[in-house]
Amino acid sequence: MKQEFEISSEEFAGQRIDKCLAGIYKEQSRSFFQKLIKGGNVTVNGQIVPKNSFVVEYGDLICADIPEAESVSILPENIPLDILYEDEDLLVVNKPKGMVVHPSAGHYSGTLVNAIMYHCADSLSGINGEIRPGIVHRIDMNTTGSLIVCKNDKAHIQIAEQIKEHSVTRLYRGIVCGNVPDDAGTIEGPIGRHPTQRKKMAVNHTNGKPAVTHYRVLKRFGKYTYMEFQLETGRTHQIRVHMASIGHPLLGDDLYGGCPRDKAVKGLQGQTLHAMTIGFIHPSTREYLEISAPLPNYFDNLLNSI
């Protein structure tokens, strides 16, 4: 399928063609476009692009022949769910550590979606398509805790609107590296894709979207600090990026810095972060509903050990 794009802003002018395409079509990686270019499937102003380092200029017309995505079958799987709340409109699940929320390349089974498809049968919202039925928001694979799943489109639309308006209560618990000096505070910094490392997000004042995280200290342990976070916005990796930006990355978060570990904290699987509480206006009753997920055992044990 041929896709055309004219360089009509300074954002992409002067960039390498592979970086430019990855910035335009964010669902694909830079390496994906490098393979397309190598195969002669990308042209600029009608001429085949000879190499990945080709630099595009203002006014250039790019044409990329992007292959159609292969259809995949997402199958229900009998995976146990820790359900915190359920009614005819939605359920709130306590997602375990290591579980991917929705299928993606390399993760077409064992996800939360596979589990809820089995649990809910045909009763899931279809707004996000067959890959993400019922999914109105997400948390990272190694983050645990509360996640809303919508059973119908009415619930999905109303919850999505609350998330967009930043009216959903989202409280997290986490352990960070170092001794956070202030008892409470707010971090404001736009979050966007890291300029050179595509797997990472970063505080990006050029292309980032506004992000606000409120925090308070629950307990200090010298080398570590136990904290509560309240999200005002919900950007990808927001708490992880914001805490790393002030020199206190989450314990176990090797992607954003982590920290030296002593014997008490060995063997962690990713960041120590838990989506504790989620609160929202119920789409049918119109009453405020707030649900909390208990800390997972590993988190409790970690607090005791440090």
Image (cartoon, grey):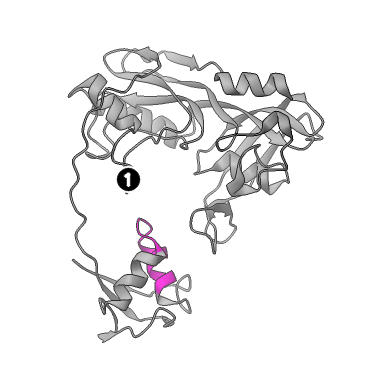
The reply, left or right, for residue 171 in relation to residue 38 is right
Q: In which quarter of the image is residue 2?
A: bottom left
Q: Residue at x 52, y 50 (%)?
A: 209
Q: In which quarter of the image is residue 43?
A: bottom left
Q: Which of 226 and 208 is in front in this view?
A: 226
Amino acid of disc 1: Ser
Q: Position of residue 190 (x, y in %)?
A: 58, 50
The residue located at (34%, 37%) in the rendering is 102
Residue that appears at 35% across and 61% down: 25
Residue 121 at x, y percent in the picture: 19, 22
Instruction: Provide the secondary structure element on which disc 1 rests.
Output: loop
Instruction: From the top left corner, tell me how far across and down residue 64 is, in percent.
Output: 27, 72
Give the labeled residue for mark 1. 104
Q: What stretch is highlighted in magenta?
A: 18-29
Residue 241's place in the image compared with 89, above or below, is below
| Quadrant occupied by the N terminus | bottom left
**Left or right of 39: which side holds 96?**
right
